[in-house]
Amino acid sequence: MTDSPARNRPARLGSGRVALTGSLRRKLVLQFLAVAAVVAVALFFAVRVTADRAAEAAQDAVLGAATIALSEGLRAEEDGLDLDLPPTTFSMLSAMGEDRVFYRVTLGSDTVTGYGDLPLPATLPPGALPEFYDASYLDTPLRLAAVTRSMLVDGRQVTALAVLGQTRFGQRAIADSIARRAALLGVGFFLLAVPLSLWAARSILGPVGRVTEAVARRGPHDLRPVNQSVPRELGPLIGALNGFILRLRGALSRTETFIAEAAHHIRTPLSTVRTEAEIALRQTQEEPTRVRLRSVIRSVEESSRSAGQLLEHALVLYRTDRVDRSEFDLAAVVTALVEAFRPTAELRDIALALDLRAGEVPVIGDRLMIEAALRNLVDNAIKYSDADGTVDVGLTVADGSAQVTVSDRGRGLGGASLADLATRFRRGGNVTDVVGSGLGLTIVTEVAEASGGRFSLSPRDGGGTCAVFSLPLR
């Protein structure tokens, strides 16, 4: 319940950017609590209305019985009416609480006893059943009951009216007491709804979390369909996810095949053209033709190198998202790489010196990517070194990491920083006359980031460049 309000908020999830629009769990909990609050309020008002009606019905029952008892206390005498006011009349009314009681007895239009200005009913009630009505007396709301009784007075039949009124404080107190209990019941129900809402939201979203966890645990090469048991409502989502995985698996397979075939179909014709151009250069003695052939050879060499590094960079980008981590001996890789470049270095009269002080160095990473990075470092050192120079390749272990150092006595960095040189297709200002594509250091930097290592480039004391490629140990 710590999510920010629902608004578009981009966030890094895996390797993509997703616009988050609030928390589904929070929305569910808030909806459950809103329903609980509505039910609690409805419960309170229902109990309050019921309590008011019940208290009013109870007061009317007591008031009606007291009014009937009052009317039954009337006796016809020779000289008028006699009222025998029984004590049970007011004792019944006292059961409703501390209320004031008013009464009035009329004979015809004359008030016999009681409060002469106590409001009378609009019409005389028929029969012996009491008629209830509301009125205000002395600025106080009253609940009144009226009962008529036919009596013989002085030889004639007259109608006596008994009216009994009571304030509503007792009724209101009873209703308020019940309402307070209803309010406490509503608050208790709402408080109980809070943990129940959290539990319900967690139960509803549980299958989504289990699917997320199952997919997140997979490795980069695990492109199997998701076979998680989910509720029926999540079936379309799992079906769409499995369809996407199937299409992704096919696309990745086609991409890998394309990169391999492109490398073969591009490099082979270029190699053929370069070979034919070199043969023609040795066979011809015409200087203009030799100049053109040298230009062709240089262009082919540039195209071949650029194509090779573009394909290698594409391979690195492809494998960055699907890093195949395995354990291998970094010392063996460095040794094989130096031996592979030794003929190239000897053609330029450059010595390759290998220093393996650490012996066997086991690391975990994508071997193909790391070989590509180290190959570019050694190639750059040879390419930018002067003839009769030396390229030193060393492997050491320090601070929990394996460090491959490639040092040369070439042209140096020319004042450029690693951030500048690692930018795609950007080269130093002092190497424009040397064939290159501007992708070598970009590949090294991206491999270091994908492998959890580091890459640094600095001027070497006495001239040249020192490149350090570090990888965490096993």
Image (cartoon, rainbow, N blue to C red):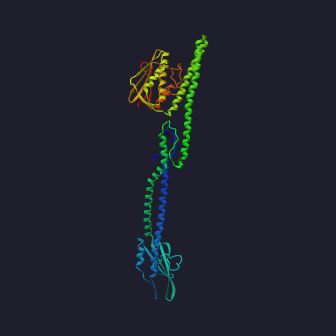
Q: Is residue 156 above or below residue 415?
A: below
Please provide percent x and percent y for residue 282.
Answer: 58, 12
Image quarter hosting the C terminus:
top left
Please provide percent x and percent y for residue 331.
Answer: 42, 25
Whether residue 457 can be seen here? no
Q: Residue at x 41, y 73 (%)?
A: 94
How many tags in the picture? Answer: 0
Residue 173 in the figure: left or right of residue 315: left
Residue furthest to the top in view is: 285
Q: Residue at x 47, y 64 (%)?
A: 48
Please provide percent x and percent y for residue 446.
Answer: 49, 30
Q: Nearer the viewer, residue 154 or 88?
A: 88
Q: Is residue 388 above or below residue 190?
A: above
Q: Is residue 150 above or below residue 319?
A: below
Q: Residue at x 59, y 19 (%)?
A: 273
Q: Nearer the viewer, residue 322 or 131?
A: 322
Please provide percent x and percent y for residue 289.
Answer: 61, 13
Q: Is residue 152 above or below residue 364?
A: below
Q: Nearer the viewer, residue 437 or 305?
A: 305
Whether residue 163 can be seen here? yes
